[in-house]
Amino acid sequence: MFRICSAEWLAPKVRRFEVEAPRVAKHHKAGHFVIVRVGESGERIPLTIARSDAARGVITLVVQVVGATTEALCALEKGEAITNVVGPLGKPTDIEDFGHAVLVGGGVGTAVIYPQAEALKAAGNKVSAVIGGRSKEYVIFEKELAQYCDAVYPCTDDGSYGYHGFVTGKLKELLEDPNEKVGAVLTAGPVPMMRAIAEVTRPFDVETIASLNPIMVDGTGMCGGCRVTVGGEMKFACVDGPEFDAHAVDFGELADRLTSYRKQEGLAWNRARDSQACDSGEESRCRARAMEEAAAKQ
């Protein structure tokens, strides 16, 4: 069991945890992730390590509620525990002196680029971060990134804060600025966003690295759920990555794979909520669930 040292909401349905995991914290590098499990029968889900403190023996995880497991995880409070935390897994970010490195984070992907910012700055880079959210309340890690970045550019879809528009628009401005001379772009966030980032940087011939965390499942390469074609070769995001050359990734295939289990995920979430309803005494939903289960056995 891995004790939760702190738990707080960063944005609607986005929660930050500090978790005691001394061996993981000791070996963590930017780009690594862990596999966590809530409950002995819970599913395994991958989460990027947003930060580690080896001296304290803790790691920071940022979780967005998107289904039954993440909802159960985000319901945990300080002093409670996560059943399993395995890692660090995956290959760490290839940190170089690119001159000027631009990090682009969307939603909880902003937590992924946070440790990269620290590592890239330590390697001598000028570091800029472009971070996005639907509105101001969804923009996270701005102050944390400012500790290591030379500039942080928040973007909001509705214009309620920072740059009015998508992160791709602000990134293009930086790429077109002759005074910036961007050497590399590293991006993490929703698959459509990373795909768009790759197309923005392609004409500029700027090295672009995408973190393919969203398609990972078991984190060991055994399930095959994170297969992705990169440069015409089949790769596994969890063991060969999770970071790849964004210009070589087949994002069309990746997007199709991402939705493969949407129906099952929806059913799992409905069952979890029906179970909560039974626990709270909502008899009609309990009866409906019982009838569904009886029909499934026939």
Image (cartoon, helix red, strand yellow):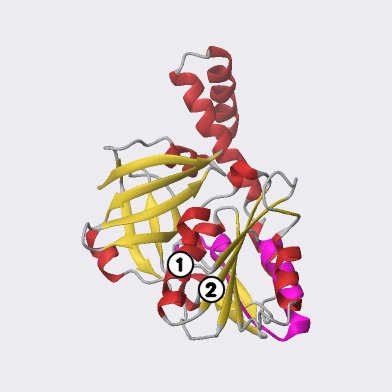
Q: Which residue range is magenta in the image?
A: 191-219
Q: Nearer the viewer, residue 164 or 88?
A: 164
- Please tell me which residue is depicted at 32% across the width and 42% down the height of the picture: 6
Decide if residue 273 is on the left or right side of residue 34.
right
The vertical placement of 107 against 125, above or below, is: above
Q: Which corner quadrant of the image does residue 92 belong to?
A: bottom left
Q: Please, what secondary structure does the residue beneath circle 2 have?
A: strand
Residue, disc 1: 148
The secondary element bearing badge 1 is classed as loop
Residue 298 place in picture, x, y as percent: 58, 32
Q: Is residue 66 found left or right of 17 in the rendered image? A: right
Q: Is residue 237 above or below residue 153?
A: below
Whether residue 92 can be seen here: no
Residue 86 seen in render: yes
Q: Give amino acid for label 1.
A: Tyr
> What is the crowding at mark 2: few (fewer than 14 residues within 10 Å), some, or many (at least 20)?
many
Which three-letter amino acid code belongs to the residue tagged 2? Val
- Is 289 located above or below residue 32 in the figure? above
> Where does the image place residue 9, in percent across and percent down from the top left?
47, 39
Where does label 2 land, which residue? Answer: 127
Q: Where is residue 238 in the image (x, y as percent from the top left)?
A: 48, 70
Q: Is residue 199 magenta?
A: yes
Query: Given contact means CB atoms under 8 Å apart, are the residues at marks 2 and 1 in contact?
Result: yes
- Give the image quarter of residue 59: bottom left
- Specify which label sits upstream in the sequence, 2 or 1: 2
Give the label on residue 128, or none: none
| Residue 24 place in picture, x, y as percent | 29, 64
